[in-house]
Amino acid sequence: MANPMARSFLQVAASEEVAAPPLRVVQIEGLVILKIIKHCKEFSPALVTGQLLGLDVGSVLEVTNCFPFPMREEDEEIEADGANYQLEMMRCLREVNVDNNTVGWYQSTLLGSFQTVELIETFMNYQENIRRCVCIIYDPSRSNQGVLALKALKLSDSFMDLHRNNNFTGEKLREKNLTWVDIFEEIPIKVSNSALISAFMTELEADSPVSQCDYDRLQLSTTPFMERNLEFLTECMDDLSVEQQKFQFYYRNLSRQQAQQQTWLQKRRSENMSRKAAGEELLPEEDPSNPIFKPIPEPSRLDSFLITNQIANYCNQINGVAGQSFSRLYLMKALHENDKSP
C-alpha cells in the first residue's frame, strides 16, 4: 500500500518555493560590473539595457554574467530581431557551459531619472516568468562625480499586488498602507571576485595607489551636474502640479455630483410623501439610469507616486553633491590660506 505521508517531487518543490527566504543581497562579480559600466559609458547619454544572468541561491541573487541588448527602435521587426538575439545569445552561452539563467536586467539612466511606468511594466513582465528578479541601475553622469552610482532594485510585494489589480485609488492605498516610498525596494549589492582576480588586483594595488575615481572626487566644478538636477526637478514639479490639478478636478466633480444627488433625493422623498398621502405606490429613492448616480472614476495615483519618488531622488542627489562640494571648497580654502602663510 502507498504511504499516505509520501509527497511527490512537484509538491516538495512547490512547498520549498513558497517557503523561500526573502531576497537580502545581490552578489555581482566584478567583471559583470565592468561590462555594465563599459556598455553604459560607450553609448552615454543614450540609454541602454542588457540581460543579467546568474543563479538564485536562497536569500542571495548571484549575477555571474551579462550581455548587452542591441539599440531598440519602434519598428516591430527590429523588436522581433532583438528577442531572437536574446535567445541566440543564451543558447550560445549554454553551449559553452556558462550560466544562462535570467535573473533580471540592467539599464543606464540620466541623473537618476529611472522611476517610470515603463520600468514597472518591465518588472511585471519579468515577474510573470521569473519569481525573483532585479534591475541594476547605473548612472554614468553621477559616476563622473567620483561615486559608483550602481543600485539594485525590485518592486515591493504590496505594490505588485495592487498593480495586478490595476487599482491605485486612495481607498486601496490606505487599505494596503502603501505610500510613494514603498514602490521600489533597494537591495544591497556585494561585489564578488575569484581568488585569482583578488590576488592579481592585490599585485596591481602597489603600482597604482591612487585611481582616477580618487581624482574625480577632488573636482571643484559641480555646476553642470547641479544645473541638470535642478532642471529635472523643475520639470517634475510641473508634472506633479498637473497631477494635482487632475485630482482637484475629480474632487470638484465628485462634490458637485453628491450635491446633485442630495437635491434629487430630497425631491424624490417629497414626491413619495405626496404619493403616500394619496395612497399611491412609492417610487424608489435611487435611479441607476439617472446620470447623477453614475460613479465618477477616480484617477490613478501611480503617476503622482512615481513623480514624488523622482522628486525625492533629485533632492537627495542635490543635497549630497552640495554637501560634498562645500567640503571640497573649505578644504581648498584651508590649503590656499596655508600656502599664503609665511
Image (cartoon, rainbow, N blue to C red):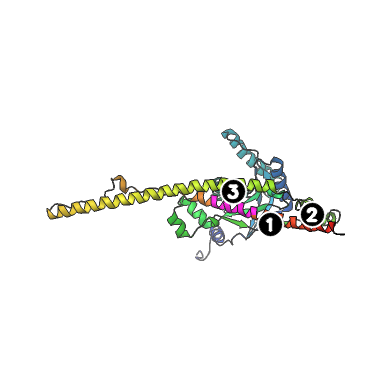
| In this picture, residue 212 sits left or right of residue 139 | right
- Measured from the top left, where is residue 19 in percent x and y? 56, 62
Q: Is residue 338 left or right of residue 188?
A: right
Image position of 313 (left or right of 305): right
According to the picture, the residue beneath numbered tag 3 turns out to be 233
The Cα–Cα distance between marks 2 and 3, rounded to whole angstroms, is 42 Å
One can see residue 125 in this view:
no
- Name which of mark 3 and mark 1 comes first in the sequence: 3
**Which three-letter amino acid code belongs to the residue tagged 1?**
Gly
Label 2, on which residue? 197
Residue 239 is inside the magenta segment: no
Element under disc 2: helix
Residue 317 lies left or right of residue 161; in this view the side is right
Q: What residue sits 68% from the left and 47% below the top?
A: 225
Q: Residues within 10 Å of mark 3 (few under 14, many from 20)?
A: many
Along the line of sight, the residue nearer the viewer: 87 or 47: 47
Q: Which residue is mark 1?
A: 323
